[in-house]
């Protein structure tokens, strides 16, 4: 069973968290309040919608910035864990005789 991951780019991603300007958006990324974008092309990035949903839910719950930063770090760590699991899966698939 596969989980669908929606990627939001540009205005759609910013709209998810309140239609902030590009300057504010990237300032919040630099401040650790929004996850770093995922490359989706040679010169474009997007954000997993479930990550933006989690940040929005924390904001709605009134979490302070220090807790949002902890959430963002956890979301970024989860990406790495997922990538590591995928690597193990791919190595196992490569080792399977045809």
Image (cartoon, helix red, strand yellow):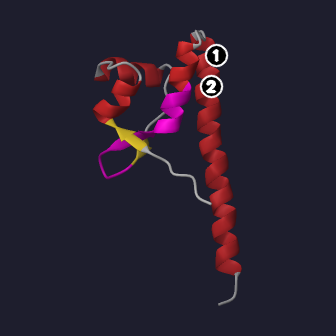
- Is 39 displayed left or right of 65 in the figure? left
Q: Is residue 47 magenta?
A: yes
Q: Write the residue at 37% across / 18% down.
A: 18
Element at label 2: helix
Q: Which mark is residue 67?
A: 1
Neighbor class of circle 2 (other Cα within 10 Å; few <14, some 14-19, many 20+) is many
- Residue depicted at x 65% and y 32%: 74
User: Depth check: 55 or 81 in front?
Assistant: 55
Is 10 left, or right, of 74 in this rendering? left
Res 75 quadrant in image: top right
| Cα gap from disc 2 to disc 1, whole angstroms | 6 Å
Q: Which residue is mark 2?
A: 71
x and y, in percent, of residue 24 in the image: 35, 17
Q: Quadrant of the C terminus?
A: bottom right
* Residue 48 is at least partly visible in this image: yes
Is residue 32 in view from this perspective? no
- Which x, y percent locates residue 9? 34, 39
Magenta-colored span: 40-54
Image position, residue 6 (x, y; %) = 44, 45
Asked if the residue under mark 1 is in contact with the one under mark 2, i.e. CB atoms within 8 Å, the reply is yes
User: Dot 1 lies on which element?
Assistant: helix
**Above or below for 64 versus 13:** above
Q: Quadrant of residue 54?
A: top right
């Amino acid at each position: 069973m596969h989980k669908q991951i929606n990627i939001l780019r540009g205005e759609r991603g910013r709209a998810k968290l309140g239609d902030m300007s590009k300057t504010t958006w990237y300032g919040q990324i630099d401040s650790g309040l929004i996850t770093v974008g995922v490359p989706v092309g040679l010169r474009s990035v997007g954000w997993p919608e479930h990550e933006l949903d989690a940040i929005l839910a924390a904001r709605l719950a009134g979490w302070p910035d220090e807790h949002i930063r902890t959430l963002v770090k956890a979301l970024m760590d989860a990406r790495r864990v997922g990538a590591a699991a995928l690597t193990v899966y791919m190595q196992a698939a490569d080792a399977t005789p045809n």
